[in-house]
Image: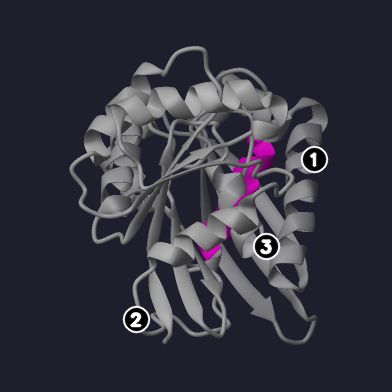
Amino acid sequence: MHKSGFVSIIGRANVGKSTLLNNFINQKLSIVSSKPQTTRNNVIGILNDENYQIIFTDTPGYHKPRYKLGNYMIKSISDGLKETDIIIFVANIRKEIPRLDLEILEKIKDFNIPKIFVLNKCDEINSKDIMDVLSRYSKILDFNEYIPISALNGKNVDKLLGLILKYLPNGPKYYDSDQMAANNEKFFISEIVREKILKLIRDEVPHGVGVEIVSMKYDDEKKKYNIEGNIFCDKETHKVIIIGKNGEMLKKISTYSRQDMERFLGSKVYIRMWVKVRNNWRDDNNHLKSLGYK
């Protein structure tokens, strides 16, 4: 009997949700950085097998929103939980259960579906500390399963997959067998650019950045994609930082982005990016919609 279903990955920012999705799919779908709120949209990855199809939703990190963009991200988390079949709650080691974790547990406690508690980064702590953390969380919410993993190096990820399959319902294939994602290509291309900005630029600048791909065309004669886009930021001073001295930072962002795009698309890429200032774009509904935050 073929199994299929929807699995939502939920948790605070920077606990390793995106790394876990990428590990499951064996493809870089969700961008990863050390900065909070890296994931802004629900990223949907599809794991296909002859006997099952799992549709994973990597949700944004749960946080207290300061802008309308943050409100959109929190709404995305709620949307990701609608009609899901299994919830994977991801946490990492803390001396006390973080307040945001308690808020998440309160939100999911009444969902009458299987819930799996995942303690990530278990390779960084000893077995006694692992058991202490699992015990503390079990007193707050009675999960169906508890498992320590390391999403980065793959430790116990195969066992976690086995637990998911244990609770996955019987069902048809919702997507074609060769499809690995439900988001469109422009979304992933814009996320690649944003990831490079997050990794190359420090402080508050990356949090005020949005990326729009305005054109993406394949040149059959030259066998390459021509991609053009805009990088939006909040302030003129941020624009100066993103461009860099003599345009060096923007050149570096574009070069690293192009390399990842070529791996993702399996084709040569020519990319041109412009940096534009849009004051308070994170609180502008129209601009948020134009960037895909609907």
Q: Amino acid at mark 1?
A: Lys
Q: Left or right? Give the position of 139 relative to 244.
A: left
Check disc 2 and report the residue beneath it. 171
Q: Which residue position holds label 3?
A: 26
Where in the figure is residue 253, as x and y percent of width and height?
Answer: 73, 42
Crowding near pointer 3: few (<14 within 10 Å), some, many (20+)? few
Question: To which quarter of the image does residue 269 belong?
Answer: bottom right
Identified by mark 3, the residue type is Asn
Q: CA distance from mark 3 to mark 2?
A: 23 Å
Do the residues under discs 3 and 1 have CB atoms within 8 angstroms?
no
| Nearest to N terminus: mark 1 or mark 2 | 2
Q: Residue at x 20, y 52 (%)?
A: 112
Q: Is residue 72 above or below residue 162?
A: above
Q: Using a 10 Å C-alpha cutoff, classify the residue at mark 1 as few (fewer than 14 neighbours), some (14 to 19) or many (20 or more).
A: some
The magenta span reads 186-198
- The percent position of residue 270, horizontal first and vertical second, equals 75, 63
Q: Earlier in the sequence, mark 3 or mark 2?
A: 3
The residue wearing badge 1 is 252
Residue 261 visible within the image: yes
- Residue occupying image coordinates x 54% and y 28%: 92
Q: Quadrant location of the N terminus? A: bottom left
Q: Residue at x 64, y 35 (%)?
A: 33
Mark 1 and mark 2: Cα distance apart in space: 46 Å
- Nearest the camera: 82 or 28? 82
Q: Main secondary structure of the magenta part?
A: helix
- The location of residue 35, given as percent across then percent down, is 59, 28
Under circle 1, the secondary element is: helix
**What is the C-alpha distance between the residues marked 3 and 1?**
26 Å
Q: Check disc 2 and give the amino acid type.
A: Gly
